[in-house]
Amino acid sequence: MDELLVRTPDLGRMRRRVESPLRQFLAAQHDALRQENEGAVADYIPELSKANPRHFGVALATIDGHVYEVGDSGVEFTIQSISKAFVFALALDALGHPLVEARVGVEPSGEAFNSIRLNNKNQPFNAMVNAGAIACSGLIVEKEGEGAFATILKTLSSFAARELAIDEAVYASESATGDRNRAIAWMLRNHGVIKGDVDAALDAYFRQCSVLVTARDLAVMAATLANDGVNPVTGLRVASSYSVARTLSVMTSSGMYDYAGEWTYRVGVPAKSGVGGGIIAALPAQFGLGTFSPLLDSHGNSLRGLKFCEAISTHFDLHVLRRMSDVRSCIVADYEAARLGRQGRLAHDQQILDAHRCAIRIIELTGVLGFANADYLARRIDAHDPPQFLILDLRRVALVSSSAVTLLASLIETLSAAGCRCVFSGRGLDFALLEALGDELVDRAGLRDFMRLDEAIDWAEDQVIFRHGGFADAQSVGLHEQELLTGLSTEQFGALLTLCEPRSYRPGEKILSAGDPPDSVYFLQRGMVSVKMPDGVRLATLFPGTTFGEMSLVEYGRTADVWADSAVLCQRLSLAALDQFRKRYPAAVERIMRNLALMLAKRLAQANVKVDLLSAN
């Protein structure tokens, strides 16, 4: 699926599209490692000894849901200890972190994964060793009773984005040879870590280890952890942010048993292995990796999987502690609304805006807004001399972190106290931000949000105009005040007016539709109208003294809708009537066309200013 045949239009022949560089790397590393035959298949559980040592599969799932697969990525095997990470996350969410953390520790043990030993608080050292995993399964049994394993299997399936099943033969083998785990479980019962039925807890644990998965499943499961608990394939939230962060933390310190320190040093990606031959690695906000090869080293980790993970981390410099970022990159543009040179206001109202050029400041943001970005944004805004209105445009922002929300809430409160009103555009007020601010501050700060930046700017400009005595003159604007008709004589104005047809519209009424015949021009005399694309994207707000439908003069079809925002009065001039006017006043129509060219040139100049503003940041 990564290669498509495409036809080149110039030569009329077929050629192959270039294969994804990442898939090329995965395939090359798989080929290089598949010949290695060191290690041995696990045999302490008899059924595992039947695994084919030649099997080797790799899958990588990105957080936007794309999955790369190489080799035996579709071969099923039992998940074994990899299940521990996901059951730990389930326990945290299902029973609450205070209870789970009171029963299970979070420190590395420094001993074998099946050690019969607790920490100095009589807790399992962590959830990635057998004692901690059995304790977590016991907690699920404590809450769910007979339905415990069904809950565990449903959760594992949700992480994998498909319904999983268990290998009954492996389950029987696990149960028949699990005396050491029974000893661990009874020890936990003795110290009050397991409070319910020990046999039920063990049965749930043996079953969860016997769930069948593939390397692809593991990649998707790992990618769900990397994606903050949201499965990138289904789009469903499987685990909370809290449980994911804590699970990844324990995976980092203890997921690879007593090789964990070496793993963190060399690979630097949270991971978990299982004696079935699987490894998961979850790089937060990047991808999830799943490998399968049943040949294990002395620590119980897949040898090929270890080498593959180290190779991809080294080649692409993916160590989780090796991160680089520029906090300044979160700001696309920072400018005052006056620099846009927007048109369409009445002369008196435009004079007010010109006199208060610094009243409205716009900051367009992009990417993921995290702690450092939000701090940089706050420092960029001088709270000692803030604008009257600050518009934060979030349309390019993919995510606002909880730490950024906390800083923004404090910033908004400070700006509000200094007399600055904050406005959001692009995605509306983030729920988490509203929650952090609280209803009282939202009301006190007068926060507003708009889906479109232009709508936010128009609203802020209206507020500035109103604050400084605008909107007082509600009389109609005559044709002599129309920019398109500048330069016409009194006689020509009179003749043109006799050819116009007055039209009025109610608030919310559609005046023109995209696709309508380009047969007339409208001169707006009273009220406001919005020009919008058919999908609702607003292109402009027009005020008295402006024209719409003027592109019909150059034979363009209607490409946008025009709506009345208030009660509207305008004059409609049909192209047929304009032809009559041309016959009598040809020089006047030539002047109208020159005015149209000047208007279009101004719009282009405004667009260039916006491009300059974007490129300057």
Image (cartoon, helix red, strand yellow):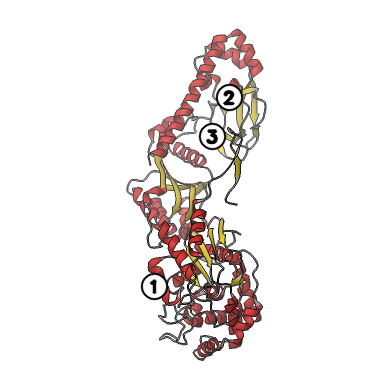
Up the image or down, 144 lies above or below 34; here it is below
Image point 65% across, 34% down: which residue?
510
Q: Kindly tell me whether residue 270 is visible in this rendering.
A: no
Task: Give the CA distance from mark 1 to mark 2.
Answer: 69 Å
Q: Nearer the viewer, residue 218 or 36?
A: 36
Q: Say which amino acid is labelled 3.
A: Ala
* Residue 492: mark: none
Where disc 2 sits, the SS reads: helix
Residue sticking out furthest to the bottom: 190
Q: Which residue is mark 3?
A: 540
> Given the image, on which type of amino acid does mark 1 rest?
Gly
In this figure, which residue is indicated by the disc labeled 2? 551
Q: Is residue 358 left or right of residue 433?
A: left
Nearer the observer, 135 or 434:
135
Return the residue nearer the eye: 334 or 121: 121
For label 2, count other residues whose C-alpha is less than 10 Å away and answer few (under 14), some (14-19) or many (20+): some
Q: Residues within 10 Å of mark 3 (few under 14, many from 20)?
A: some
Gap in angstroms between the C-alphas marked 1 and 3: 59 Å
Q: Earlier in the sequence, mark 1 or mark 3?
A: 1
Q: Which residue is mark 1?
A: 261
